[in-house]
Amino acid sequence: MVEDKVNMQQDRRREPDLLIEILRWLGIFGWFVMIVALYILDLAKPEEENMFTKTADFSVRKTWDPKLIHYLFCVLIFGLCISIIGIIINSRRHHRKDDRSKYILITLGAISIFGIIKYLFQF
């Protein structure tokens, strides 16, 4: 009976190395950037008229704020760059069978690409 040499090798990694820590922090920072993008999106969208604005006779903005939308576009590009850097580092670090892909970075990149495409075709 022949056994695989891979199964006989001892895993000598004791703790996550620098690249794994960088990947973890890129994921956390990338989702922080996405939360900032969602906040900017909320500020940029048209305001809704409600009972208080009608009684106080306040004017509400009926269109998207172009300056904030431009900031949102820049933040989405930054989030995409973080995602691409993380995916490249993860692909270089993915050597062993038990190494895992960071799907959080892939999801961040997909959301960023979707937002960029929506910006390019809508605004």
Image: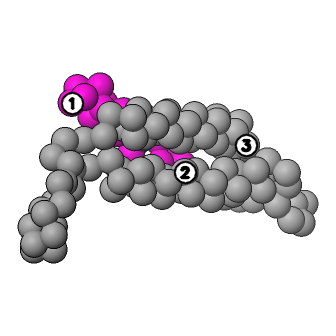
Specify start and end residues of the magenta stretch as a single range: 99-123
Q: Which quarter of the rendered picture does the N terminus lie within?
A: bottom right
**C-alpha span from label 3 to label 1:** 38 Å
In the rendered structure, find residue 122 and report the number of the disc placed on it: 1
Q: Nearer the viewer, residue 111 or 34?
A: 34
Give residue 27's position: percent from left, percent from top.
Answer: 61, 54
Residue at screen point 36% across, 37% down: 69
Image quarter of residue 112:
top left
Residue that numbered label 3 is attached to: 93
Give residue 55's position: percent from left, percent from top.
Answer: 10, 72
Is 101 contained in the magenta span?
Answer: yes
Is 40 contained in the magenta span?
Answer: no
Three-letter residue code for mark 3 = Arg
In the rendered structure, find residue 33 and report the number of the disc placed on it: 2
Three-letter residue code for mark 2 = Val
Three-letter residue code for mark 1 = Gln
Closer to the N terminus: mark 2 or mark 3? Answer: 2
Closer to the N terminus: mark 3 or mark 1? Answer: 3
